[in-house]
Image: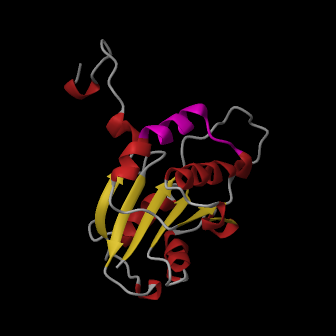
């Protein structure tokens, strides 16, 4: 069995409009959102052995934070330009070319490609645009990454910060239509 974590990077900053897109950092909220997920993620049975990330700053910062949650060494985190703006098919090909010695990998990238990749790989599409800091973990009953096929991933979990944020007392509850 192989495990794939697909991650949309945490909330990024648009504060400095002069920065090229690849150089945009995380917002403080993005770092807080990741920290909110730490106990949730580390409580799950599945853990990544290696993290592969887009080389965009916001994705790289997300990847480094998540790797630290799992106690991964820097040598188990790779930043690659080919994951920046990679199509879902390119993400699938990237995964297929991983070392079979790895049982579980995490891919950190961008939307809409990450949302589309989740739907491409899953048995049942989530059919949602992944929110920032979203992590989808799927298992595949294969022995080699080369065997990875579309629509064969069994959803293990789908985590994102909003699931764990406390509603502020006195705030408007939009779900009641008020």
Q: Is residue 30 left or right of residue 79?
A: left
Quadrant showing the N terminus? bottom left
Q: Relative to the observer, which residue lies in front, 46 or 11?
A: 46
> What is the magenta range?
24-36
Q: Position of residue 96 (x, y in %)?
A: 50, 82
Residue at the image position 30 percent from the left and 17 percent from the top: 172
Q: Position of residue 6 (x, y in %)?
A: 45, 61
Outermost residue, left side: 176
Quarter location, residue 120: bottom left
Residue 159 visible within the image = no
- State whether the magenta stretch is mostly helix, strand or loop: helix
Magenta span contains residue 33: yes
Q: Height in image: 178 above or below 67?
A: above
Picture mark count = 0
Q: Position of residue 15 (x, y in %)?
A: 69, 31
Quarter location, residue 122: bottom left
Magenta span contains residue 13: no
Residue at the image position 56 percent from the left and 38 percent from the top: 31
Q: Position of residue 46 (x, y in %)?
A: 36, 63
Q: Is residue 71 left or right of residue 121?
A: right
Q: Height in image: 155 above or below 110?
A: below
């Amino acid at each position: 069995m192989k495990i794939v974590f697909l991650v949309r990077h945490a909330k990024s900053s648009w504060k400095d409009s002069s920065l090229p897109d690849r150089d945009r950092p995380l917002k403080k909220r993005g770092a807080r959102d990741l920290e909110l997920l730490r106990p949730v993620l580390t409580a799950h049975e599945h853990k990544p052995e290696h993290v592969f990330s887009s080389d965009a700053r916001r994705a790289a910062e997300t990847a480094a934070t998540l790797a630290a949650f799992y106690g991964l060494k820097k040598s188990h985190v790779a930043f690659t330009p080919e994951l920046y703006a990679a199509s879902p098919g390119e993400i699938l090909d990237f995964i297929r070319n991983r070392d079979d010695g790895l049982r579980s990998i995490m891919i950190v990238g961008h939307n809409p490609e990450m949302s589309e990749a989740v739907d491409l790989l899953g048995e049942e599409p989530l059919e949602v645009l992944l929110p920032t800091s979203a992590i989808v973990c799927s298992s595949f009953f294969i022995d080699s990454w080369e065997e990875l096929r579309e629509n064969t991933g069994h959803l293990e979990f789908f985590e994102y910060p909003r699931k764990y944020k406390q509603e502020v007392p006195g705030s408007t509850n939009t779900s009641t239509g008020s």
